[in-house]
Image (cartoon, rainbow, N blue to C red):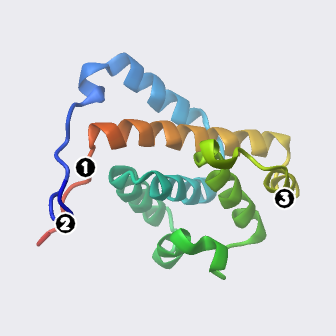
Amino acid sequence: MSITTVPTPRISLKSLAPESYRAMAALGRSVTLDPQLRGLVNVRASQINGCAYCVDTDGSEAIAHGEDPRRLAALAAWHDSPFFTPRERAALAVTDAVTRLPDAGLPDDVYAAAREHFDDEELAQLLFAVLVINAWNRIGVPTRMAPPRLAGA
C-alpha cells in the first residue's frame, strides 16, 4: 500500500457477527476504571497497535469527557512528557508492556510500580481496560475500520 493511499475498510464484524460484537461491547462496558485514565490507556494502546479508528474514536471521547488535547498528543512520548501524574505513568507503563506482550510481557518492575498506585481491584480493572482496547484494536486494524474523514482531507 502506498503512503498516499488510505486503507479501504474490508468487512464489518458488527454486521456479520453481531452477537460476538455485542459481547465485546458488553465486556468493554464492564470495566470500571476511572474514565479519564481509561481514555489515556485506550488511546495509548491504539497508537501502539496502529488503530486509526480507535485513536480517533477514543481520543474524541476523551476530549468530550474533559481530557486536554495536549496530553493526548503527548501520549506518543509519555515517557518524556511532564503532563502525566505518577499514577498515570504507572498505568501507561502497564499499557505499553501488556500491549507489546510478545516483546517483554509485564516486567516485574512495571508491575511493582503499578502496585504502588493501584489497589488490587483497580489493577484488575486496569488490566481489563488494556485487554479490551487491545481486542478492539485487533478488530479495527485487520478489518481496516476507518474514522470519518475530516473536512478537506
Which residue position holds label 3? 113
Residue plotted at (19% across, 66% down)? 150
> x, y percentage for residue 133?
51, 43
Disc 3/disc 2 C-alpha distance (Å) = 39 Å
> x, y percentage for residue 69?
46, 74
- Of 8 and 118, nearer the camera is 8
> x, y percentage for residue 132?
54, 38
- In this rendering, does residue 34 appear at all? no
N-term-proximal mark, 3 vs 2: 3
**Amino acid at the residue labelled 3:** Ala
* Secondary element type, mark 2: loop
Residue plotted at (77% across, 45% down)? 122
Which residue position holds label 1? 146
The image's mark for residue 150 is 2
79, above or below 62, in the image: below
Quarter of the image where one finds residue 52? bottom left
- In this rendering, does residue 61 appear at all? yes
Circle 1/circle 3 CB separation < 8 Å: no
**Amino acid at the residue labelled 1:** Ala
87, above or below 97, in the image: below
